[in-house]
Image (tube, rainbow, N blue to C red):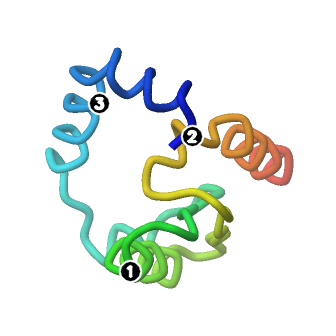
Amino acid sequence: MPAPAREYLVNYTSNNVDDVTATFRDTYSVDALRRLAVPTLVAYGARSPETMVKIVQAIAALVPGARLERIEDANHALTTTHADLVAAMIGTLADRSS
């Protein structure tokens, strides 16, 4: 992992723990995912664990019109290690919905 990303993760460990905890706070049913009517980006890192890849593929398959993107040289921490690329992808998705 690049030094800046590692330093960020170390410096903001408590924030990351809060983010992970929040991820498990709510559940999303298959029906709720199928009803999503907003532009949806489902991104994953090429170096993410296979379980994560299967999860994002399943989510993308359920959400109408979801855009599934694989980010090379990224793992499951891609929003930290590839923040600019993820932001650009989100921006492109938002531009399409305008």
Task: Residue at 57% x, 37% y: name it.
Answer: 2
Q: Is residue 26 left or right of residue 44?
A: left
Find residue 66 and name its label: none
Real-space Cα separation, disc 1 to disc 2, in angstroms: 19 Å
**Where is residue 46 drawn, in percent x and y?**
57, 70
In the image, is residue 72 above or below residue 20? below
Which amino acid type is shown beneath numbered disc 3?
Answer: Asn
In the image, residue 47 sits, relative to residue 96, either above or below, namely below
Q: Which residue is mark 2?
A: 81
The residue drawn where x is 60% and y is 56% is 38
Q: How far across and down, in percent of the image, does residue 20 sit? A: 23, 41
User: Upstream in the sequence, badge 2 or badge 3?
Assistant: 3
Type of amino acid at the residue the image marks with label 2: Thr
Q: Amino acid at mark 1?
A: Glu
- The image quarter containing residue 84 is top right
Question: How far is disc 2 from disc 3 in space, using C-alphas?
Answer: 13 Å
Mark 3 lies on residue: 16
Q: Earlier in the sequence, mark 1 or mark 2?
A: 1
The reply to whether discs 2 and 3 touch (Cβ–Cβ < 8 Å) is no
Residue 56: x, y in percent? 45, 72
- Helix, strand or loop at label 2? It is helix
Please identify the residue farthest to the top as the structure is shown. 11
Q: N-terminal of the two: label 3 or label 1?
A: 3
Give the distance between the C-alpha atoms of the residues marked 3 and 1, in whole angstroms: 22 Å
Side of 4 where 26 appears, left or right: left
Q: Nearer the viewer, residue 33 or 10?
A: 10
Residue at mark 1: 50
Instruction: Tell me the element at label 3.
Output: helix
- 60 and 39: which one is in front? 60
Asked which secondary structure carries label 1, the reply is: helix
